[in-house]
Image (tube, rainbow, N blue to C red):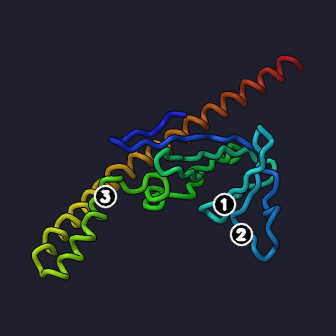
């Protein structure tokens, strides 16, 4: 799939197609089951457990789903960002906004280095006086400001990219299904 690139931020996407096997959690005891749990079997015959962001996603056994994963090679994290139900034509976004940014993208390396380098300066300022407090707090505020600006720039672009991926995949699945129906009716 097409990767999302915004500045130095790179997020890879992967899609898995499958069919709902069970609406109930297969491996958990009854008291630990969640309402949003659903098991699907992919084309590779792998079972996948999903939890939905919307409790009533109206998924039934036999429905065809596409599950989109986002992963970042730097943070080594992989999360479900979009579940598309082809039978109902509905989407569910289990992870949006700040959570998606924190899990997939995270903070940039230089922001963490700035904050780590300021910790000894704060310790020296308490030992020697107020000379180091003001520059340390200014740098800390600058790092926080840059991170919030990066969030404000990247999150809307990432959501637009995910929506586009969902629409493109839905169109591909509809075309593939209509072609397979045409082949079935032509051979019958």
Dot 2 surroundings within 10 Å: few (below 14), some, or many (20 or more)?
some
Residue 183 to residue 40: above or below: above
Q: Which of 15 and 93 is in front in this view?
A: 15
- Looking at the rendered structure, the secondary structure element under dot 2 is loop
The residue wearing badge 2 is: 34
Please provide percent x and percent y for residue 104: 48, 52
Residue 169 to residue 183: above or below: below
Measure how far apart labels 3 and 1 are at the Cα level: 35 Å
Disc sitting over residue 113 in the figure: 3
The residue wearing badge 1 is: 51
Q: Is residue 19 left or right of residue 36?
A: right
Q: The C terminus lies in which quarter of the figure? A: top right
Given the current orientation, which residue lies at the most extreme top position? 187
Image marks 3 and 1: residues in contact by CB distance under 8 Å: no
Given the current orientation, which residue lies at the most extreme left position? 131
Dot 1 surroundings within 10 Å: few (below 14), some, or many (20 or more)?
some
Q: Which of marks 3 and 2 is nearer the N terminus?
A: 2
Front of the two marks 3 and 2: 3
Please provide percent x and percent y for residue 25: 78, 63
Q: In this view, does 67 lie to the left or right of 5?
A: right
Image marks 2 and 1: residues in contact by CB distance under 8 Å: yes
Please provide percent x and percent y for residue 158: 43, 47
Please provide percent x and percent y for residue 149: 28, 56
Q: Nearer the viewer, residue 188 or 94?
A: 94
Q: Earlier in the sequence, mark 2 or mark 1?
A: 2
Front of the two marks 3 and 1: 3
């Amino acid at each position: 799939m097409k990767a999302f690139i915004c500045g130095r931020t790179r997020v890879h996407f992967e899609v898995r197609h499958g069919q709902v096997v069970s609406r109930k959690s297969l491996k958990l005891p009854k008291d630990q089951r969640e309402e949003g749990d659903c098991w699907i079997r992919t084309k590779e015959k792998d079972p996948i457990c999903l939890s939905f962001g919307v409790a009533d996603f109206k998924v039934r056994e036999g429905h065809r789903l596409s599950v989109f994963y986002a992963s970042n090679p730097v943070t080594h994290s992989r999360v479900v960002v979009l579940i598309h139900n082809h039978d109902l034509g509905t989407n569910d976004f289990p992870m949006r906004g700040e959570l998606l940014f924190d899990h997939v993208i995270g903070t940039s390396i230089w922001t963490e280095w700035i904050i780590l380098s300021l910790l000894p300066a704060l310790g020296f300022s308490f030992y020697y006086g107020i000379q180091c407090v003001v520059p340390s707090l200014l740098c800390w505020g600058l790092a926080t400001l840059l991170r919030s600006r990066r969030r404000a720039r990247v999150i809307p672009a990432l959501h637009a990219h995910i929506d586009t991926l969902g629409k493109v995949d839905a169109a591909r699945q509809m075309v593939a299904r209509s072609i397979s129906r045409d082949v079935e009716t032509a051979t019958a």
